[in-house]
């Protein structure tokens, strides 16, 4: 299990391959990569901030919850910070399990958390240079995350 918060880009295929290298027990790897969108040509960049150490610790708590819910054989979460332009990779979640159902469910669970509660602050900057304000989770993101809560 690996969690990284970094400024540098990543190569998703290499990260996924690292989960299966020298493993014969992995039957499925699910990889999700979130990209910075241009919001209809209005966004020049997202400026992503975090508190070093705190972000990793909070993500680790949710990773542990995923490990308790599903039989995972490997997991990677990478989130970038700094100024990211449209088309840049922001986040990657990769899960490995013996079976696809667990890998898919765990990846969805983790991404729902990353979109709604992960301790990152995103500020949008328009193509005109103006700061457009802090980006918050959308109602649809909150609804997706709510399905994982115990009844």
Image (tube, grey):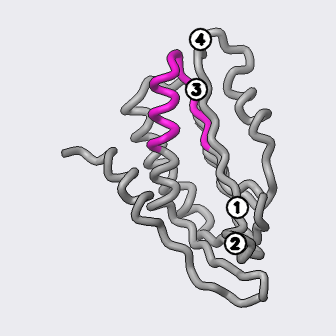
Q: Position of residue 42 (x, y in %)?
A: 71, 77
Instruction: State whether residue 16 is above or below residue 135.
Output: above
**Nearest to viewer (mark 3 / mark 1):** 1
Q: Which residue is mark 3?
A: 96
| Measured Cα–Cα span from mark 3 to mark 4 | 10 Å
Q: CA distance from mark 2 to mark 3?
A: 30 Å
Mark 3–mark 1 distance (CA, rounded to whole Å): 25 Å
| The residue stretch that appears in magenta | 93-109
Q: Nearer the viewer, mark 4 or mark 2?
A: 2
Residue located 71% across and 90% down the image: 130
Sequence-wise first label, 4 or 2: 4
How many numbered callouts?
Answer: 4
Q: Earlier in the sequence, mark 1 or mark 2?
A: 1
Q: Is residue 19 above or below residue 79?
A: above
Q: Is residue 80 magenta?
A: no
Residue 116 drawn at (x, y percent): 45, 60
Which image quadrant is residue 14 in?
Answer: top right
Q: Earlier in the sequence, mark 1 or mark 4?
A: 4
Tell me if label 4 and label 2 are in contact, CB under 8 Å. Answer: no
Inter-mark Cα distance, 4 to 2: 39 Å
Whole-Å distance between the Cαs marked 1 and 2? 7 Å
The label shown at residue 46 is 2
The residue carrying mark 1 is: 36
Residue 101 placement (x, y as % from top left): 46, 24
Pointer 3 with pointer 4, Cβ within 8 A: no
Identify the image quadrant of the C terminus.
top left
Tags 1 and 2 touching, CB below 8 Å: yes
Q: Secondary structure at mark 4?
A: loop
Residue 1: give x, y in percent of width and height.
58, 35
Q: Which mark is residue 25?
A: 4
């Amino acid at each position: 299990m690996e969690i990284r918060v970094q400024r540098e880009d990543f190569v998703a295929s290499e990260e996924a391959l690292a989960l299966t290298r020298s493993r014969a027990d992995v039957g499925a790897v699910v990889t999700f990569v979130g990209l910075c969108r241009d919001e209809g040509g209005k966004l020049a960049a997202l400026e992503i901030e975090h508190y070093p150490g705190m972000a990793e610790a909070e993500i680790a708590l949710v990773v542990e919850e995923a490990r308790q819910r599903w039989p995972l054989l490997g997991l990677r979460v990478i989130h970038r910070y700094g100024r990211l332009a449209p088309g840049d990779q922001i986040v990657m979640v990769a899960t490995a399990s013996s079976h696809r159902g667990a890998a898919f469910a765990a990846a969805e669970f983790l991404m729902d958390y990353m979109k709604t509660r992960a301790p990152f602050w995103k500020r949008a900057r328009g193509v005109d240079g103006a700061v457009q304000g802090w980006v918050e989770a959308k109602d649809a993101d909150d609804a997706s995350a709510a399905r994982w809560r115990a009844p």
